[in-house]
Amino acid sequence: MKTDPFAFDIIAPDFIPSQYDNHIERRLSAMAGQYADSTALAAVLAESDPLLYQVYELRRPPVAGELLHGISIVHPGKIGDEYFMTKGHFHQVIDTAELYYCLKGRGFMVMETPEGESRVESLRPGRALYVPPRWAHRSVNASLDQDLVTFFIYPGNAGHDYGTIEQQGFRKLVVERDGNPVIIDNPRWLPPK
Ligand code: S6P
Ligand code: ZN
């Protein structure tokens, strides 16, 4: 499919792209199993189903030479002491990388490989982050009063594999302790076989 060059704007304060062709809204009910504190989770869901994050995608044909890109906005909040976060995934074509650039907020990218290696990198405005091939990734908003906004770019054929993360989560969790974000081990996580 031939595409002409195009340009668009991503402008403060909300950074919603001036053009996009897919808008995803993820609510708590869609990823309830990911939060460690099931009592806090049930209490929140009994009252409401909060919007955790939104993604604005400029979709591209699913081929290696294309670059799918867009904006991810994780809203502020917690379930128990665990901050709002994205579901997280491996790419379906696992050896595809992704580049993130943080435009707003404070947070972390939690990453791990199928072999159980784990890394957590800070996100703050002006910071670029490279997620290498084979690293699952999840963004966490560690601020309770502002959105975490990132611009992402990855190969058009990468796809998403959510299954592994849905089963046992990431090796590390980001939680609030005495008003500060702290990285702890996920008690539910199991080492690779
Ligand atoms: C896609 C890229 C982002 C995420 C978005 C939402 O490869 O990493 O666009 O899709 O941040 O996260 P998730 O885990 O719900 O897809
Ligand atoms: Zn990705």
Image (cartoon, rainbow, N blue to C red):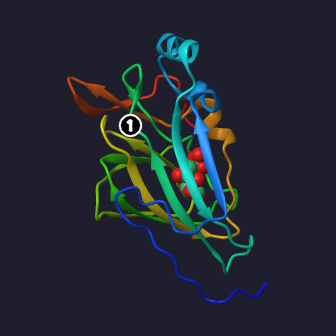
Image quadrant where one finds the C terminus: top right
Q: Nearer the viewer, residue 121 or 105?
A: 105
> Badge 1: how crowded within 10 Å, few (<14), some, or many (20+)?
many
User: Looking at the picture, how far across and down is residue 141, in whole percent?
Assistant: 38, 41
User: Looking at the picture, how far across and down is residue 160, in whole percent?
Assistant: 67, 53
Residue drawn at 64 percent across, 32 percent down: 30
| Residue 182 visible, this angle | yes
Image quadrant where one finds the N terminus: bottom right
Q: Is residue 9 above or below residue 174?
A: below
Q: Is residue 61 left or right of residue 131?
A: right
Point out the residue furthest to the right here.
1
* Number of marks: 1
User: Looking at the picture, how far across and down is residue 161, in whole percent?
Assistant: 68, 49
- Residue type, label 1: Pro
Q: Is residue 104 left or right of residue 157?
A: left
User: Looking at the picture, how far across and down is residue 69, in whole percent?
Assistant: 56, 68
Q: Is mark 1 within 8 Å of ligand 1?
A: no
| Residue 114 visible, this angle | no
Q: Is residue 46 above or below residue 122?
A: above
> Mark 1 sits on what residue?
76
Corner quadrant of residue 130: bottom left
Residue drawn at 34 percent across, 57 percent down: 13
Residue drawn at 51 percent across, 17 percent down: 44
Corner quadrant of residue 63: bottom right
Q: Is residue 64 left or right of residue 124?
A: right
Q: Is residue 8 above or below residue 41?
A: below
* Element under disc 1: loop
Residue drawn at 67 percent across, 89 percent down: 4
